[in-house]
Image (spheres, coloured by chain):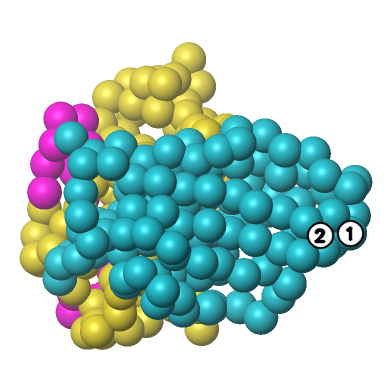
Chain colours: A yellow, B cyan
Amino acid sequence: QKEVEQNSGPLSVPEGAIASLNCTYSDRGSQSFFWYRQYSGKSPELIMSIYSNGDKEDGRFTAQLNKASQYVSLLIRDSQPSDSATYLCAVNPPSAQKLVFGQGTRLTINP
Amino acid sequence: SQTIHQWPATLVQPVGSPLSLECTVEGTSNPNLYWYRQAAGRGLQLLFYSVGIGQISSEVPQNLSASRPQDRQFILSSKKLLLSDSGFYLCAWTQTSVYNEQFFGPGTRLTVL
């Protein structure tokens, strides 16, 4: 089992709809969880961090964490064509000075 | 505010040639520093990380090496490049904390011919 798994994609969503991106992780003791957005040819950009169970909202983005289920998700409301990118889930395993990244989910928002 | 620089932005090198990529961070002290590689259409592969000057942890055996000669400088090197070394090289930093939020530099795109 991979340490961090994301839905394989690609994911295609119509403009204005909600895009839902999912991520599961294997190390139950993990404490920090991140979502990065990577446009084609560019470096990853941190868009959301979440550390406790529940929802965290920032503008059109909502991160959801369920530690019991070892599940993290990112919801993008009112999806825009500019949201088209690859989204990377990252997890900080316990006692580790590094992040473990999923393979990423490519999201396309169709006008 | 903190900024991270990488150079060069792009590089085309022949097989067997040496490599030196540099990463520097401004506006912080004693950061943790990371080198990643991303092959075309693939995920991020952690190559090395450093928690302090002269301290290097290697994640994958390969013909690359890393050094940290100064607090905010991280260098990735190779004595002889292979075709498989082509990719997008990313440097990242984090302020030492329990959360380990990482921030990436702009990257270096390396093509080995």
**Residue plotted at (77% across, 65% down):** B79
- Residue type at tag 1: Gly
**Residue plotted at (71% across, 44% down):** B110
Magenta stretch: dominant secondary structure: strand
On screen, residue A31 above or below B11: below
Marks 2 and 1: in contact by CB < 8 Å? yes
Task: Between residue B113 and residue A44, name the one nearer to us.
Answer: B113
Q: Position of residue A6 (x, y in %)?
A: 46, 61
Q: Which residue is mark 1?
A: B16
Q: Which residue is mark 2?
A: B81
On screen, residue B5 above or below B31: above
Q: What is the crowding at mark 1: few (fewer than 14 residues within 10 Å), some, or many (at least 20)? A: some
Chain ID of residue with mark 2? B
Q: Position of residue A1 (x, y in %)?
A: 51, 83
**Residue plotted at (16% across, 57% down):** A50
Q: Earlier in the sequence, mark 1 or mark 2?
A: 1
**Residue plotted at (28% across, 41% down):** B26
Chain ID of residue with mark 1? B
Q: Is residue A66 visible?
A: no
Residue A67 drawn in magenta: yes
Check residue A69 in the rendering and tell me which mark sits there, or answer none: none
Q: Is residue B25 visible?
A: yes
Residues drawn in magenta? A56-71
- Residue type at tag 2: Leu
